[in-house]
């Protein structure tokens, strides 16, 4: 996953140093599609991991209603 510092470096290389996406790819090792995706956003937003389904609680599960 790309970190916020890397995202800032990519935006700096593209907008300030005027490097091409391919050159940024060569220097960072991050795929061109990923670079393009993060350059297309106006405000850099830190990437988030999204769970596809809720975690199951095998031990604590029966006691969650009492805790709440």
Image (cartoon, grey):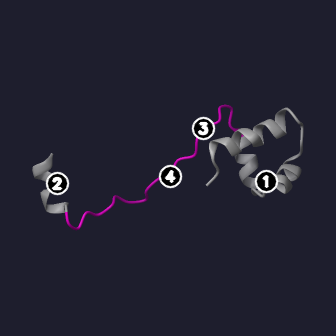
Q: Which residue is mark 4?
A: 49
Distance between mark 1 and mark 4 Cα atoms:
22 Å
Against 36, residue 61 (above or below) is below
Mark 3 in CB contact with mark 1 (< 8 angstroms): no
Disc tally is 4
Q: Which residues are magenta?
A: 40-59
> Which residue occupies 82% across, 54% down?
25
Q: Name the N-terminal-most of marks 3 and 1.
A: 1
Q: Nearer the viewer, mark 1 or mark 4?
A: 1
Q: Which residue is mark 1?
A: 28
- Mark 3 element type: loop
Q: Name the N-terminal-most of marks 2 and 4.
A: 4
Q: Name the N-terminal-most of marks 1 and 2.
A: 1
- Mark 1 element type: helix
Mark 4 in CB contact with mark 3 (< 8 angstroms): no
Q: Which residue is mark 3?
A: 45
Choose top left, top right, bottom left or bottom right for residue 20. Answer: top right
Foreground pick, 19 / 9 = 9
Would residue 59 be found to the left or right of residue 40 on screen? left
> Which residue occupies 83% across, 39% down?
14
Q: Name the N-terminal-most of marks 3 and 2.
A: 3
Residue 44 coordinates in the image, percent (x, y): 65, 36
Is residue 58 covered in magenta?
yes
Q: Which residue is mark 2?
A: 64
């Amino acid at each position: 996953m790309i970190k916020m510092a890397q995202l800032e470096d990519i935006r700096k290389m593209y907008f300030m140093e005027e490097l091409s996406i391919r050159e940024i790819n060569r220097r960072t090792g991050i795929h061109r599609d990923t670079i393009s995706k993060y350059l297309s956003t106006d405000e850099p937003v830190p990437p988030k991991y999204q769970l596809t389904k809720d975690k199951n609680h095998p031990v604590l599960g029966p006691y969650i209603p009492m805790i709440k």
